[in-house]
Image: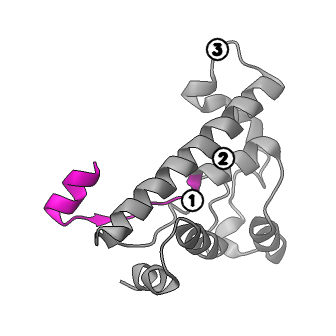
Amino acid sequence: FIPAILAQKTYYCPTLIVGLGYQQFALREFSRYTESQLQAGEPADRFCPCVSGHVDRLVRALPALSGKMTGAGRISWLTEYYEKELVQMKANLKVLSDRGAKIVMGTDAGNPLTLHGSSVWVEMEEMQKSGMSAKKVLRAATY
């Protein structure tokens, strides 16, 4: 997909942190950002499924986790999957950034624990950890 984005001069929105929200869901361990947002009671986050007690149902609903995997095996698989995915996504973002692709920041807020508000800061940090300069990250966030 990298050659296509560069050739078509398409805007790329990596949404790096969506998988992290699913990890937090499965592990029931919230990041400092998520925890602070949930405690602050942001109106948009009051409807977060984890607050309403739907964690298990959402984790079970993920097609890749259906079948014979249960409990700890399911959580282990999910964690490993998203960690590998994040490494690949960051590598792709680094290549695109280095090659001058048009990059915009977005979060896919509304997915489990990808909260409106705090997820913006987490996404920007992950973009910078991928190797983008702070200047490029700010430009992507304000395009």
The CA span between labels 3 and 1 is: 27 Å
Q: Percent x, y for residue 105?
A: 45, 72
Element at badge 3?
loop
From the top left corner, tell me how far across and down residue 97 is, in percent: 37, 69
Identified at 70% across, 46% down, the residue is: 23
- Distance in Å between CA atoms under marks 2 and 1: 12 Å
| Mark closest to the chain's N terminus, 2 or 1 | 2
Is 40 left, or right, of 126 in this rendering?
right
Question: Residue 58 placed where, x, y %?
Answer: 66, 38
* Quarter occupied by the C terminus: bottom left
Q: Which of marks 3 and 2 precedes in the sequence?
A: 2
Per the rendering, the mark at residue 110 is 1
Question: How far across and how far down the image is residue 124, in percent?
Answer: 56, 74
Badge 2 amino acid? Tyr
Most extreme residue toward the left, as rendered? Answer: 8
Residue 56 appears in the figure: yes
Name the amino acid type tagged 3: Gly
Q: Residue at x 49, y 48 (%)?
A: 88
Callout 1: SS: loop
Q: Who is closer to the viewer here, 3 or 42?
A: 3
Q: Residue at x 28, y 72 (%)?
A: 100
Magenta run includes residue 99: no
Looking at the image, which is closer to me, 8 or 52? Answer: 8
Q: Which region is colored magenta? A: 1-18
Viewer-proximal residue, 72 or 133?
133
Of marks 3 and 1, which one's residue comes earlier in the chain?
3
Disc 3: which residue = 67
Residue that numbered label 2 is attached to: 22
Do we see residue 58 in this rendering?
Answer: no
What separation in Å lies between label 2 and label 3 (alpha carbons)?
Answer: 19 Å
